[in-house]
Amino acid sequence: MRRHSLAFRAHRRQRGTTMIELLVAFVIFSFGMLGLAGLQTKILAQGQSGLYRSQAAALTADVLDQMRSSIIAARAGKWNTTTGTHASSVTVTGGGIADTELQKWKRQVETQLPGGEASITVDASVAGVNNSVTIVIQWDDSRGREAVQSFTTVSRL
């Protein structure tokens, strides 16, 4: 009989310890879930930043192909534009396909990238040889790494 009463007393003294263990486990689990949620938001932001960068690369390749198809207009500087020039302010003349294509391209940059702006600078060297073009696309990437991202491409026409 004595053994039974000693075991009963030891059991009475430990009352509530499982509740404390459960609360500690819940706190540890909550911190782990908060960490996973923060990691998930970081991954989403970096994925979006990568998408914007690939869109900028595709837009650059697109405008380079268009410039090479009308290389005479490109060498004459008809594709030159600055980052402050928006698609609505590109003047379209009746005879030039470069103006309409430039306006369409600038509109694509503005719609596909948040706060998207682009500049094109053609460096016409001696007698049309070694023409190089510099294309800079900038956009707002405040959800990702930095506030302003820039994608620069230098190529030959």
Image (cartoon, helix red, strand yellow):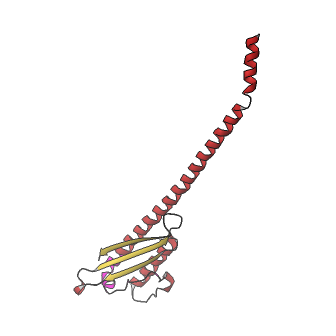
- Image quarter where the N terminus lies is top right
The number of discs equals 0
Quadrant (top left, top right, bottom left, bottom right) of the C terminus: bottom left
- Residue 145 position within the rendered picture, expressed as x and y whole percent measured from the top left: 48, 64
Residue at left offset 38%, top offset 72%: 152
* Residue at 56%, 56% in the rendered image: 41
| First to last magenta residue range | 66-84
Is 73 left, or right, of 37 in this rendering? Answer: left
Name the image quarter holding residue 95: bottom left
- For residue 68: magenta? yes
Left or right of 24 in this view: 149: left
Height in image: 36 above or below 157?
above
Asked if residue 122 is among those painted magenta in the image, a careful observer would answer no
Q: Is 1 left, or right, of 62 in this rendering?
A: right
* Residue at the top extreme of this rendering: 1
State whether residue 28 is above or below residue 71.
above
Residue 50: image quadrant is bottom left
Residue sitting nearer the eye, 27 or 85? 27
Q: Residue at x 27, y 80 (%)?
A: 131
Residue 49 image point, x, y percent: 48, 63
**x and y percentages locating residue 45 in the rendered image:** 52, 60
Q: Position of residue 77 (x, y in %)?
A: 34, 86
**Residue 52 versus residue 119 in the image, above or below:** above
* Residue positioned most to the bottom: 94
